[in-house]
Amino acid sequence: MLPLAQSLPVPRDLELPLPLPEWTLAVMLVLSFLLHILFVNLTVGSSILTMIYEFLGWRRNELKFDLLAHRITKTITVNKSAAVVLGIGPLLCINLLYTIQFYTANTLTGHAWVLIVPMVIAAFLLAYLHKYSWDRWSRGGWKIAHLGVGFMSMLLFLLIPFIFLSNVNLMLFPEKWAEVRGFFSSLMVGNVFPRYFHFLCASLAISGLFFAGWFGRKSFPLAKLAGFTHPELRRVGYKIAFRVTAAQFIFGPLLLLTLPKAGLSTPLYTVVLAGAGVGLVVLLMLRREIAAPDESIGRAYVAICVTFTVIVLAMGTGRHLYRETALALHKDLVRQRTVEYAAHLADFNEKLASGQIVMPVTGERVFQNCASCHARDKVLVGPSLIEIAAIYKGNPEGIVRWATAPGKKRAGSQQMPSFAILGPEKLQMVAKYMLEAGAKDSPAKP
């Protein structure tokens, strides 16, 4: 434990009170994240299914698959909007509960994290173009272009959560931060890829279940999906959900077995295994529904959705348990560092006030009063130090006189305020520093 603690980067935290008790924020984080990820799953799963069915309709020349793809793509723009809005809550909660860890991961993933916003905008615009150009492009010479637009939109919808997942994964392992050199090296931390495959399976399973209810309901107008019946549409959605949920019994154990030991705990195993047990129940329920006759298929839909919700809650709780366990040591060390810093700062200020510590006064230190307006080699508000050194070469007293009672020489620039309050001794020190720093053969000063 001690060698690990010594190797961790442990900054001090900001001593600001939380707006709510920590346990309340934790519950809000889990629930708001699950609601957000539901619509992310629907957006990603829908974009994949849209491309599959549009491609099948094109290759097989079957209109019903093209119509189904068109109806699915109409849901993407709605779900993505809900996903963005509902993402604000968990983002705020994670910022409050894991400020140090989350912002460090943001910084380490670098350009990829910054590019999320333009990628989201591009994905949205492409999704709208794909939807609204369907009738004009999808059945003529523009079909390949239409497929290309949908494919690019799908790729962006796949990439955006991958970056988010990589970032959230990286924040769990502070001991690896020193090894990370940007986004691609962050992919080697933890188990990013098994987590992502698990996410993709969940997206397709939830999308299939949603379509079984949405398109399979009796009130859905079949005229919009010629070639399908309500039971057939429900069965298509059920089959997608069944097959992908079955695949989760491969990706789920792979995810669990590849999790770094830092966050493993008995409560985590208990919650995850309980969720897997409920998953078996869902598989049996889906299998019965798929085999049910047309007149009775769909009767267990609500029960399946409720059971699925139990699985989702179990997985969300397990994710939080792992995060808390993985970051427990680092959070404790950050709290200790924050307390130590506060005590050290209070002691320093007390000694400084009593005269036990004397801060040396130098020209460079006094110049900080001037640095917001004067840089060495460029014009900020006032002239650069290079220009000042050329004007007052060998004449620091001239700078002192000007700083004591400045005038206005340059049109379009602000008049410099008087710095007479610093006194002649300090002004003399800063004048000499400015001449030295502004000399052309002088190295740049920060």
Image (cartoon, rainbow, N blue to C red):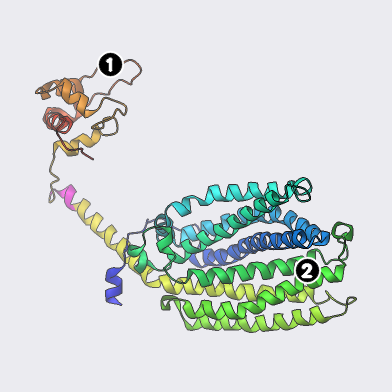
Residue 373 among those drawn in magenta: no
The N terminus: image quadrant: bottom left
Chief secondary structure of the magenta span?
A: helix
Q: Position of residue 248 (x, y in %)?
A: 61, 77
312 horizontally vs 10: left or right: right
**Closer to viewer: mark 1 or mark 2:** 2
What segment carries the magenta color?
Answer: 351-355
- Say what amino acid the circle numbered 2 marks: Ala
388, above or below 154, in the image: above
Q: Position of residue 4 (x, y in %)?
A: 30, 73
The residue that appears at 70% across and 63% down in the rendered structure is 52
287, above or below 418, in the image: below
- Say what amino acid the circle numbered 1 marks: Lys
Res 408 quadrant in image = top left
The C terminus: image quadrant: top left
Residue 353 among those drawn in magenta: yes
Q: Can residue 287 be seen in this view?
A: yes
The residue that appears at 63% across and 84% down in the rendered structure is 277
* Residue that label 1 marks: 408
Q: In whole angstroms, how far apart are the C-alphas of marks 1 and 2?
A: 76 Å
Along the viewing direction, whichever of 78 and 91 lies nearer the viewer: 78
192 horizontally vs 308: left or right: left
412, above or below 244, in the image: above
Along the viewing direction, whichever of 125 and 425 lies nearer the viewer: 125
* Residue that label 2 marks: 212
Res 107 quadrant in image = bottom left
Q: Position of residue 133 (x, y in %)?
A: 74, 46
